[in-house]
Amino acid sequence: MSKYLIKIDRKTIKKNPNAGSTVTLVPGIVDHYIDDNGNEVWERPVQRIYHEAERSYLYKYKNNIVQCNECKKRFGVNKLESDSYGYDDIYSDTICPYCGMWNCCEIEYEQFDKEMMK
Ligand SMILES: [Zn+2]
């Protein structure tokens, strides 16, 4: 079983303007009700989503051609599908878009390195 190394597209590397940020504001569902004084109220709550600090750089991976081990079709790595069963115990992000085979090929993503900026 061959393994594909998906490389970072050097042209897409850029600094992340939100680097280090740990919170993202997401608009919630509009709430519409009549308050105790009979006034009509429209509210749009803002939800704060906390997450790990955003990485310093943004980049995309090249859309390399990979081959399905099952149906032998060749396609861009971006076409691979992902799915999970139950509580994400069983997960695959390398599902063939043609025959639906799970783990249809083995992929390794290149690690980002600041040296790539040069
Ligand atoms: Zn396939």
Image: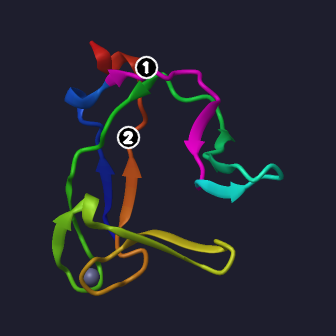
Classify residue 36 as left or right of residue 32.
Answer: right
Label 2: state its secondary structure: loop
Q: Which label sits in the foreground, 1 or 2?
A: 1
Residue receiving disc 2: 110
The front one of 96 and 54 is: 54
Residue type of the residue flagged with mark 2: Glu
Residue 46 is one of the magenta-drawn residues: no
Categorize mark 1 by other alpha carbons within 10 Å: few (<14), some (14-19), many (20+): few
The residue at 48%/74% (across/down) is 83
- Give the x, y percent position of residue 72: 20, 80
For residue 80, what is the image quadrant? Answer: bottom left
Which mark, residue 35? Answer: none
- Give the x, y percent position of residue 79: 26, 65
Label 1: state its secondary structure: loop
The residue at 42%/79% (across/down) is 102
The residue at 30%/48% (across/down) is 6
Outermost residue, top direction?
118
What is the magenta range? 14-29
Residue receiving disc 1: 17
